[in-house]
Amino acid sequence: MARWIRIAETNCNDSTREDEFNEWYDKVHIPLTLKSPLGIVAASRYERLNPKKGQGKYLAIYEIETEDMEKALAAHIAYGTRLIEKGLHSSLLELVSVDNFRKIDPPPGGYRTA
């Protein structure tokens, strides 16, 4: 099974409602995203200390296991559309960037410090 990570940089588009945004992200968005057909096995979030213009203040990293990323992404997009139609999306979410990376297996013996 191929392993991937999906990274998403986001912002809250209303700084006075940042607590509400983070509560929605943690209690609604992440749990629903973990149920996506994308093959997500784990998720974690980070906050950037000093975001610059054009950067996301928040970073989500999703660990994925799938053999067919293109097919999984198509199913994930359809799933996301259904969630939006059900009103489970937050108008506070500003998506700055999203990308997918396939894991490169380490060489024999792995990566080690000297």
Image: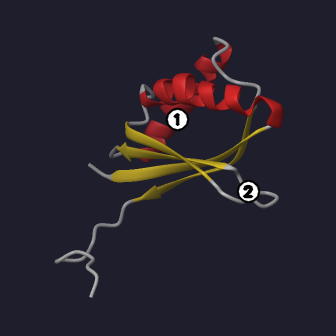
- Does dot 2 land on a helix, a strand or a loop? loop
Q: Is residue 68 left or right of residue 58?
A: left
Amino acid under disc 2: Gln
Q: Which residue is outermost to the left?
A: 109
The residue indicated by pointer 1 is 74
For the C terminus, the image quarter is: bottom left
| Among the 4 quarters of the image, the one containing residue 89 | top right
Q: Position of residue 98 (x, y in %)?
A: 62, 49
Q: Position of residue 31 (x, y in %)?
A: 47, 25
Judge whether residue 56 can be spotted in this image: yes
Q: Is residue 59 left or right of residue 11?
A: left
**Are dots 1 and 2 in contact, CB under 8 Å?**
no
Amino acid under disc 1: Ala
Q: CA distance from mark 1 to mark 2?
A: 26 Å
Q: Is residue 77 left or right of residue 12?
A: left
Q: Position of residue 81 (x, y in %)?
A: 62, 23
Q: Residues within 10 Å of mark 2 (few under 14, many from 20)?
A: some
| Among the 4 quarters of the image, the one containing residue 80 | top right
Q: Residue at x 54, y 50 (%)?
A: 7
Q: Which residue is outermost to the bottom?
A: 114
75 versus 69 height, above or below: above
Depth check: 86 or 31 in front?
Answer: 31
- Does dot 1 land on a helix, a strand or a loop? helix
Q: Position of residue 60 (x, y in %)?
A: 54, 45
Q: Which mark is residue 55?
A: 2
Q: Residue at x 73, y 56 (%)?
A: 55
105 versus 79 height, above or below: below
Judge whether residue 14 can be spotted in this image: no
Q: Which mark is residue 31?
A: none
